[in-house]
Amino acid sequence: MADLVIVGAGPQALALSCLLLQKRPRLRRRLRIVDPSGRWLSRWQRQMEQYEIPWLRSPSPHHPHPNAHALRQFAQSRQRSRQLEGPYGLPHTDLFGDFCRQVISEYRLTDCVLAASVDRIRLPQLGSGPMALTLNDGTTLATGRLVIATGSGTPLMPAWVGEIAGDHPPEALQHSDRIHLPSLLSLRGQRILIVGGGLTSAHLVLGALRRGALVHLLCRRTLKHKPFDADPGWLGPKDLKAFHAEPCMRRRQRQVLEARDGGSITPETAAQLRQAQRGGALQLHDHCEVHSARWCASHWSVRCTDGHGLEVDRIWLSTGHRQGVSQHPLLRQLQEQSPIDLVNDWPVLASDLRWPGSAVHVMGGLSALQIGPAARNLFGGREAAQRICRAVIKQ
Ligand SMILES: Cc1cc2nc3c(=O)[nH]c(=O)nc-3n(C[C@H](O)[C@H](O)[C@H](O)COP(=O)(O)OP(=O)(O)OC[C@H]3O[C@@H](n4cnc5c(N)ncnc54)[C@H](O)[C@@H]3O)c2cc1C
């Protein structure tokens, strides 16, 4: 039996594993990490690669090592400080990757990820005792404590997609999750409609333009420019103190949604988009949504809510993910076995991120009612790791 199983081997799980091993080295023997890829940070690496992201959006202290200065020190010791961009030291993607490999090796975690996915959770019948996890190969794993660190939710598809009649080639309409820019060698002359106003849509625009496409970017409001996902006040006590003092979870949820404010792009990316607009390869349609789309044998005929029409070869949906207990296969099971309060599908967790009445903790976006707007980011991973680690040690 394991003392602790972590489901998922992304940056949040890595932050928790390192902190736990730093504080309680003897936990190593009874810690299990499970991810279908069988390795650390597979989804993280894939998303950086698929959108050809040159550097992170988060500042240099945000990473999985317990010491916030460790990434900067790593860069300095290897004469790579110029790979920390601007006043916040945004790490270049390859620097961050090399640093994480070093962290994994420092904490002797390299071969610790079991290649499997957790399909089912059975909580103990009487409230205490081990819980049973069923893996995708049918085997079971018993554990005293569980951490769910499985990252983003399910792709969010706009309603008009469900109303498209007839067939179309799969590559003609794709959610951003499915797009892998390096596999698209040339898009010369292709007309691409990209829907969405977040940073992923901007990376897709730039990737498509580099390949010779003509791009229409459709945003339902004005493109917002911000250095980070949420204002810097949310990455420290300035805004978080009042957030944590707020007893009403509905109000907390409103604050999280307002702070994230839909999606935004960085000022540098905004400048690149403006340049492309001036060059004529990019047309920006703001305050506009797709009303309907029809596949006409070789291209899309799209009608927009502002009344104008577009003819394009591909549509890329950068419309984000839906996060909620009902969208998450494991949390849905927990809610059936041990129901807790939800606020519009978000779980009301205990302050140590425990699913109340169980020994299951939740990291990532669905801990936002406790961690705040940056719960799904690297910052959120560090905060969540601290809270869960304290709970494990106190036991
Ligand atoms: C394009 C893009 C760029 C981003 N850039 C930044 C940035 O610069 N800075 C920042 O702070 N944040 C950034 N983010 C947010 C980023 O996704 C998170 O910071 C980070 O990936 C979250 O880590 P995680 O461990 O929660 O999830 P993930 O990295 O998604 O890892 C979760 C893991 O869980 C596994 N898993 C899922 N279900 C199961 C299961 N049932 N059983 C076992 N394993 C399972 C998955 O396979 C995956 O490997 C970015 C997001 C995107 C999409």
Image: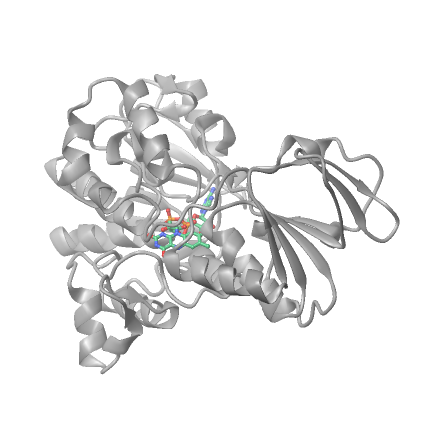
Residue 5 or 324: which is nearer the viewer?
324
The N terminus, quarter of image: top left
- Please indicate whether residue 293 sits to the left or right of residue 139 in the image: right
Residue 293 or 136: which is nearer the viewer?
293
For the image shown, how many numbered marks are present on the structure? 0
| Residue in view at x 35 percent, y 41 percent | 364
- At which x and y percent is residue 361? 29, 34
Looking at the picture, does residue 97 appear above or below residue 316? below
- At which x and y percent is residue 49? 50, 65
Taking the view exactly as shown, the residue that stands out farthest to the right is: 297
| Residue in view at x 16 percent, y 29 percent | 242
Looking at the picture, does residue 157 appear above or below residue 347? below
Residue 238 or 382: which is nearer the viewer?
238
- Please indicate whether residue 80 sits to the left or right of residue 170 in the image: left
- At which x and y percent is residue 290? 67, 37
- On the question of residue 253 being in view, the answer is yes
- At which x and y percent is residue 211? 64, 70
- Please indicate whether residue 350 sits to the left or right of residue 188 in the image: left
The C terminus, quarter of image: top left
In the rendered view, how is the structure colored? one colour
| Residue in view at x 79 percent, y 47 percent | 300
- Please indicate whether residue 161 sits to the left or right of residue 141 in the image: right
